[in-house]
Amino acid sequence: MPDKKVVIVGGGISGLSFVSQAIQADYQTTLIESTDRIGGCFDSHRFGDFSLELGAHTCYNSYRGLISIIEKYALADALLKRNKVSFMVYNKGKVEKIVKHLSFLEILVSLPKIFNIKKGNLSVKDYYQAILGSNNYKNILGPSFNAVLSQDAGPFPADSLFKKRERRKDIFRSYTLRGGLQTIADKISQDKKLTIHTTCTLTKIMKTDSGFQLTLSSGELLQTDFLVLATPVSSATAYLKDLYPNIASELSKIETAQVESVGVVVDKMKVKHPPFAGLIPTNDDFFSVVSRDVITHEKFRGFTFHFRPGLLDEKQKLAKITQVLGITQDDLIDTEERTRSLPKLSMQHKNILAKIDQALIGTNIYLTGNYFQGLAVEDCINRSFLEFNRLIQEFVHQKSS
């Protein structure tokens, strides 16, 4: 049993997946979270027995890292299969089928280029314009990718989307959990071997002979052998700027985008639109609407609007929501709002990460988050698992030296 301490800063799925590994390996594990809620993008707003996702919405049977956590914490029986309902387009006030906005002639002409073009060298915009046509990209593909990432997806590396992963055929193809994805975060955070500090931040990090001394915003001092930063990239940059300025300098090159999300609960009889998985706007103030229709409820329907930042105030957002859903504000039974920071990945991203990973070696600092392998839940988990494996290897090396 390793007599070592690990402190993880950040209680989202990246931090929690690291927690799950550290506890299983019997490390003394402490989690520090700046808000009063554990879960990060696993953010299920609960209204009685109805839950509405305000962050991540969908998980798949190809998410083997996530499934391993679900099984580790005996949550497999809580899995709920998602209904097969389609994504639709919101265009000039109308809800339309995606196929209406595609030019199949343009696809027929452009698609043969897929055999001669390398995805890894191109941005999302350049790659998909080339193989499916510029008008198709402008009219539907670009808005669809923006909806997935809740920001302008065009500059992202093309190979950061739609990664091929091996599926678990004994698990539903796509699923959520009873009580929402927050259920996973709740279960990990309730582990009796975990110490948690919420509404708490680091105010000072001092390197010691055996690791680090951390000063918390509460004034408490913690000693740790290993420090894990599972925070937004801007926070990781701020934490490391004095201790490891070379790492902070590279982190500062990763830009971020804001997304303003509003979830609403509505009586299912009030919304006239038939069930849909989500709405993709062709040109509007929001990136997407994600529906709770994938899990049927006898009384309610729920919708989460992911708005472009800084365009609408609270009153205007509610007006937009009621306009799109064809209801009045009196029909809104419950509302909940969140603002999140997301990384913007560029074509230089891999080079930046390579320099960061090289500089991290031997520091006893471990970085994880949605700015490494990608924004998907499984990307975050895989990065945490890789960093934990690095911790194990470096610990073994330190013991033998």
Image: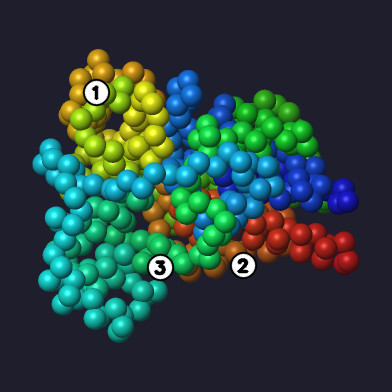
Task: Say which residue label 3 marks.
Answer: 159
Instruction: Please provide percent x and percent y for residue 99.
Output: 18, 57
Residue furthest bottom as drawn? 116
The residue type indicated by label 3 comes to Asp
Helix, strand or loop at label 3? It is helix
Q: Are marks 1 and 2 in contact (CB under 8 Å)?
A: no
- Labelled disc at residue 358: 2
Return the mark for residue 270: 1
Choose between 316 and 360: the one closer to the eye.
316
Does residue 226 appear to the left or right of 249 in the view shown? right
Q: Taking the image as drawn, is residue 24 in sight?
A: yes
Above or below — where is 178 with respect to 15? above
Nearest to N terminus: mark 1 or mark 3 = 3
Q: Is residue 59 left or right of residue 298?
A: right
In the figure, is residue 357 to the left or right of 164? right
Between residue 182 and residue 251, name the one nearer to us: 182
The nearer-to-camera label among 3 and 2 is: 3
Residue at the image point whose x is 80% and y is 42% from the top: 28
Q: Secondary structure at mark 1?
A: loop
Residue at x 60%, y 64% (from the top left corner): 357
Give the mark toward the camera: 1 or 2.
1
